[in-house]
Image (spheres, rainbow, N blue to C red):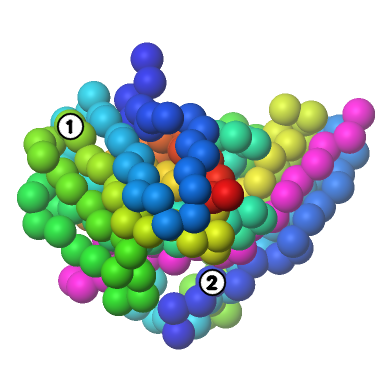
Amino acid sequence: DAMVIQNPRYQVTQFGKPVTLSCSQTLNHNVMYWYQQKSSQAPKLLFHYYDKDFNNEADTPDNFQSRRPNTSFCFLDIRSPGLGDAAMYLCATSRQVGFEKLFFGSGTQLSVL
Amino acid sequence: QQQVKQSPQSLIVQKGGISIINCAYENTAFDYFPWYQQFPGKGPALLIAIRPDVSEKKEGRFTISFNKSAKQFSLHIMDSQPGDSATYFCAASPDSGAGSYQLTFGKGTKLSVIP
């Protein structure tokens, strides 16, 4: 009954080789978020979509891009992964913004060789 | 101004004991204070949340205490169980306007409950 599904669970890529992570949701929520979480650290927001409106955090590197082709799906593209991009990437959704419960997926653990 | 400071970084509690995790914030625009629980290899899950119009909220064994004047809030886990062993994140966000989508997380507390 997973509501926010991330694939793959583990992803290994080579330094500089583009990689795409995917997220789907069955909740029909308006807002989708991508967070980066490094080991023993808090999740860090990269960007979010309110419906089709894309909102990039000021300190999110240009190397990170996102697409949301429809309500259910959202993708995180890392154009040229560096060693520092190795992390857990978490997708989350909420009905609206503000005072809203976030529903997280189980994450994709990205390794960069 | 955007930081949420969380302590302790790690906590070991005996089964049946009380676990207490503290958070402090500076931004007076923060108006929503959730706690998330994260098990290894999983995404965080909302545990309990509070708004500053109340000083305490209880759900089962979990209680949030909120002190608006001190800009502090804490999570108390009563009768702690080994199954509570996880990392706990406090967070805060404004209620509206620019930034209301933005949850600012604390750095997390790794709780270990030993039998």
Q: Residue furthest top?
A: A1
Name the residue beneath numbered marker 1: A72
Count the numbered circles shown.
2
Above or below: residue B60 compared with residue B10: above
Secondary-structure class at tag 2 = strand
Q: CA distance from mark 1 to mark 2?
A: 32 Å
Q: Quadrant of residue B29?
A: bottom left
Q: Is residue A108 magenta?
A: no
The disc at residue B18 is none
Residue A68 in percent (x, y) is at: 15, 44
Q: Chain of mark 2?
A: B
Q: The disc labelled 1 sits on which kind of residue? A: Ser
Q: Quadrant of residue B100?
A: bottom left
Left or right? Give the position of A75 relative to B90.
left
Q: Residues within 10 Å of mark 2 (few under 14, many from 20)?
A: some
Image depth: mark 1 or mark 2 in front? 1
Residue B15 in percent (x, y) is at: 86, 33
Camera-nearest residue between B33 and A112: A112
Name the residue beneath numbered marker 2: B4
